[in-house]
């Protein structure tokens, strides 16, 4: 799966932090993820993300990532399926 995502995103994903909230043992980052280039089908990719970091003893103990699954299903799943059915890239 990781290799397929590497083929779908010719460039890395970039996360632009929109807001940070810290209280008690949590830091929450709201971000927008975008691809620095178009996907292999020449479309663009942008998604909304929320990361929740749990802190213990001054270190990150866990990370939870939440994103808009509808965008992933609409934009990425068809490309992964095409790569799975084909021996050659799109």
Image (cartoon, rainbow, N blue to C red):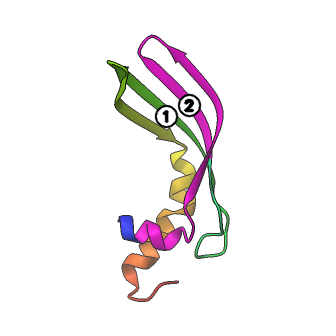
What x and y, as percent, mark residue 89?
47, 84
Question: In this rendering, would 6 be left or right of 2?
Answer: right
Residue receiving disc 2: 29
| Kind of element beneath mark 2 | strand
What x and y, as percent, mark residue 2?
37, 64
Circle 1 Cα neighbour tier, 10 Å, few/some/many (<14 / 14–19 / ≥20): some
Question: In this rendering, would 17 be left or right of 28?
Answer: right
Q: Is residue 64 part of the magenta span, yes or no?
A: no
Q: Earlier in the sequence, mark 1 or mark 2?
A: 2
What x and y, as percent, mark residue 61?
32, 28
The residue segment tinted magenta is: 4-32
Q: Nearer the viewer, residue 29 or 84?
A: 29
Circle 2 Cα neighbour tier, 10 Å, few/some/many (<14 / 14–19 / ≥20): some
Name of the residue lying farthest toward the top: 24
**x 60%, y 26%: residue:** 20
Name of the residue lying farthest toward the bottom: 88
| Kind of element beneath mark 1 | strand
- Up the image or down, 25 lies above or below 52; here it is above
Question: In this rendering, would 18 be left or right of 2?
Answer: right
Q: Quadrant of the N terminus?
A: bottom left
Q: Is residue 20 part of the magenta span, yes or no?
A: yes
For the residues labelled 1 and 2, say whether their Cβ atoms are less than 8 Å apart: yes
The answer to which quarter of the image holds residue 60 is: top left
Main SS of the magenta part reads: strand
- Up the image or down, 36 lies above or below 47; here it is below
- Alpha carbon of mark 1 to alpha carbon of mark 2: how far? 5 Å
Q: Nearer the viewer, residue 77 or 57?
A: 57
**x 34%, y 31%: residue:** 62
What x and y, as percent, mark residue 64?
40, 34
Residue receiving disc 1: 51
**x 55%, y 72%: residue:** 10
């Amino acid at each position: 799966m990781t290799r397929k995502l590497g083929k779908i995103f010719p460039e890395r994903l970039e996360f632009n932090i929109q807001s940070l909230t810290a209280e008690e043992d949590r830091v929450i980052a709201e971000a927008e993820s975008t691809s620095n280039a178009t996907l292999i089908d020449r479309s663009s990719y942008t998604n909304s993300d929320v990361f929740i970091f749990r802190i213990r003893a001054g270190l990150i103990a866990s990370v939870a990532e939440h994103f808009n699954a509808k965008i992933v299903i609409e934009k990425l799943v068809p490309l992964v399926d095409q790569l799975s059915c084909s021996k050659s890239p799109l």
